[in-house]
Amino acid sequence: MIYIMGTGAGGYKGLTIEESELIAGADHLLGAKRLLDNIPDDLIHGEKREFVRTSEIAEYIEGHKADSICVLFSGDTGFYSGAESLKKILDEKGYEYRIIPNTSSFSVMASRIGVDYRNSTLVSLHGRCGSEMEFKRAVTGALMKGQSCFFLTGGENSPARIGKVLDDAGLSDVRMYVGIALGELTEEIIIESAKEISSRGFADPNIVYIPAVPIYERRIPGIADDEFIRGDIPMTKRFIRNAVISELADAKEKVSVIWDIGAGTGSVSVEAALAFPDATVRAVEIKAEGAGLIRKNREKFHAYNLEVSCGAASEMLGKLEIPDVVFIGGSGSELSFILDHLFTYGKNIHVVLTAVTIDTISGIHQYLAEKNMAASMCEIAVNNVKKLGSSHMLRPESPVFIISFDTKEED
């Protein structure tokens, strides 16, 4: 019989009575070195073997399938555990097994700091998120759900790295709770600000708790224009933003990175950040005044997944993470450069543009015709009703054309 066990917090002391009895009677005890080292030698009567990869564990089981085997995994066997991949292999081979869960790190940490975690967002960062931006997306995406968060950390994805993300997002003073070696003799709970945590070193294993941070409650696109902090920088108005966000959502692939080029005051950037909380939104704005306004609006609307780059597109784009979706609201004389740059990636990018002049519309049409690309195009004309004395008059806004296309058409 094969027993897949979660060891819980505290090593041997965290085992249930059933687990202790099964380990004592097992012919083979398998697992990572850290987990095996926590089991006293006098409890083990069978062969002890160190493994990390589930494929290696399955191969070993294949040669000893008639024996009693206990496989140890850390924490909760139902949350990003190696138990899941081992279970799939055993199912394919038709082996009989039992999964024996144990107390999760989330439960232990919540009990230590006295919080209820029924509505918390639970995230595993252990061995996940290869790039810096992937890591940021995982953290900010969780925070933007408006709930308290627990993060399992490990390796380079440390509490300090989470603290740095919060510091960069304007959450320097948020209190972070770091549980170190829960259940073991060296257990420690550190409670400090994100800024303080960002400069610390931590040994594994850890779990981080962050109370709910402020979020902008309204998530339906269409924030009123006068809610944005504005200067003399152009802004995409409310009804046009609604249509733009709808067009951005037409992307055929998963949206992880969005560019807003010529972001102005950041109204589209903010709306996109709120509509796509698990994505990184990159606002590119050539004017320093505009970039400053975007940062202020990012703070006002708690758009933690919004990044700001100040500079010309020709200087900035090559330094940025490759996008899945691009909105071009302002490009000056760089439109052809921007479009050429997007086509160099060789991947499908969903592009949405707005244009108010015939010259821009004609230029886009000619560019796409030369590429033999099909595009969707519509005109939106908004008329506001204003009271004038005892009468009501129509006050038209300038009509705006919205053009969208994919850089690679479906085969």
Image (tube, helix red, strand yellow):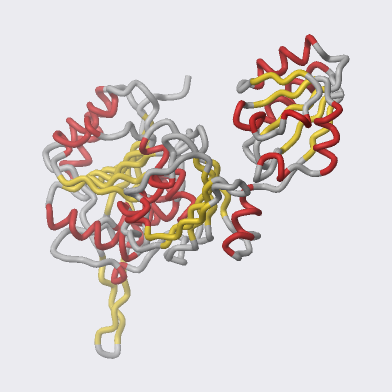
- Count of numbered badges drawn on the protein: 0
x then y, percent, for residue 319: 22, 32
x then y, percent, for residue 240: 33, 56
Can residue 276 be spotted in the picture?
Answer: no
Q: Nearer the viewer, residue 226 or 305?
A: 305
Tell me which residue sits at (65%, 37%) in the image.
74
Q: Tell me which corner region of the image, top left, top right, bottom left or bottom right, holds residue 368.
A: top left
Tell me which residue sits at (28%, 66%) in the image.
228
State whether residue 216 is above or below residue 250: below
Q: Residue furthest bottom?
A: 390
Can residue 379 be spotted in the picture?
Answer: yes
Going by the image, does 399 lie left or right of 6? left
Q: Residue furthest top?
A: 63
State whether residue 19 is above or below residue 277: above
State whether residue 45 is above or below residue 117: above
x then y, percent, for residue 398: 23, 59
Tell me which residue sits at (24%, 57%) in the image.
294
x then y, percent, for residue 303: 37, 57
Q: Nearer the viewer, residue 250 or 269?
A: 269
Tell me which residue sits at (61%, 46%) in the image.
184
Image quarter where the N terminus lies is top right
Q: Residue furthest front?
A: 42
Going by the image, does 172 lie left or right of 14? left
Q: Tell me which corner region of the image, top left, top right, bottom left or bottom right, holds residue 267.
A: bottom left
